Image (cartoon, rainbow, N blue to C red):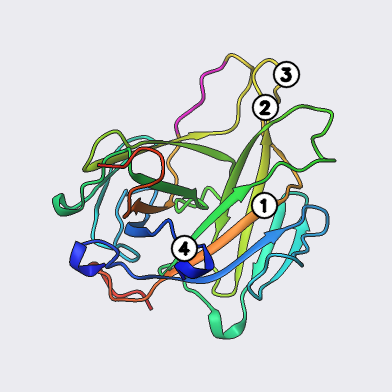
Amino acid sequence: MSGLNFSSPNLAVVAYCEVDFEVGASTACNSGVSTTMLAVGVYQITLPTQLSQPDAADLIIVQALRTPGIEGTQGRWGRDIVVDDSDLFNKVVYIWRTAPGGIAPGPNPTPIQLNFKFMLLRTTIQAPYNLPP
Amino acid sequence: MPGLLFSAPNLAVVAYAEVDGVEGASTACNSGVETTRTGLGVYVVILPTTLAQEHTRDLIMVQLKQSSDGSGIVAKVSELEDDQSVTKTINVWSASQAAADVIPTRIDSSFMLLILRTTISPPVGAPT
């Protein structure tokens, strides 16, 4: 693909998992990472020691999943997700529920337990701007 | 892999970047794109002209990160404009709202960006 002048970024998949909302477990779709729920709406993914990833090299994508049992009778809600990737081994995912307009919106989004998919990629070649470790 | 009936979509990685929310700069994790902050919560990613990607064939994912300005972990939402071939724009708002009819407030945020693209003609409608 380099001949096509794209795909040259050569990203590698470091880890993935599908996390259950209740206790943060991930037993089905998981590349070999540990997951846990630290608090309501706060989940931690712990990488194996040989796969530690500095935040300057990793690319993390999180996708919220509809979670029956959490929202079943309340309709669907917007979700806001923020990732803290500053630690080498522990990547933390924060999830909130945003009340849709007209349905008792609060001043602040509420942390919520939710199923989600997590994928962590990393660079494998020297990028034009600085070399990721 | 095609024999396994997956990987057949043949997506290629076009570009990636990790962008600082305050400056709009991307100096560490960057495949070779230019990034800039054009206003509060508005960031522009400029692809090299050889890597221009029409919106009909690009697949772009944005993941918001913790704030780099020390404001900590706050809920945020983002939206992407990919209608330009070379310039992709990311808009970020705070998720907090005081009432249902309040316009969301723009907010700066660091984020990760990944651009993929198709390399083969998909079954329905070939990308140009």
Could you tell me which secondary element the residue under label 2 belongs to? loop
Q: Residues within 10 Å of mark 3 (few under 14, many from 20)?
A: few
Residue at position x 78%, y 63% from top?
A25
Residue at position x 51%, y 62% from top?
B6
Q: Nearer the viewer, mark 4 or mark 1?
A: 4
Q: Is residue A5 above or below residue A130?
A: above
Chain name for mark 4: B
Give the Cα separation between the discs numbered 4 and 3: 42 Å
What residue sits right under mark 3 in the picture?
Answer: A103
Amino acid at pointer 4 = Ser
Q: Which mark is residue A107?
A: 2
- Comparing A46 with A125, the one in front is A125
Q: Which circle's residue, 1 or 2, is located before the other in the chain?
A: 2
Kindly tell me whether residue A86 is visible in this rendering: no
Q: Left or right of A101: which side holds A10?
A: left
Give the Cα separation between the discs numbered 4 and 1: 23 Å
Chain name for mark 3: A
Circles 4 and 1: CB distance less than 8 Å?
no
What residue sits right under mark 1 in the picture?
Answer: A116
- Magenta-colored stretch includes residue B49: no
- Comparing A57 with B70, the one in front is A57
Q: Which mark is residue B7?
A: 4
Residues in magenta? B102-106
Q: Residue furthest bottom?
A: A50
Q: Residues within 10 Å of mark 1 (few under 14, many from 20)?
A: many
Where residue A127 sits: x, y (%)?
Answer: 27, 70
Kindly tell me whether residue A130 is visible in this rendering: yes
Circles 3 and 1: CB distance less than 8 Å?
no
Give the Cα separation between the discs numbered 3 and 1: 24 Å
Could you tell me which secondary element the residue under label 3 belongs to? loop
Q: Residues within 10 Å of mark 4 (few under 14, many from 20)?
A: few
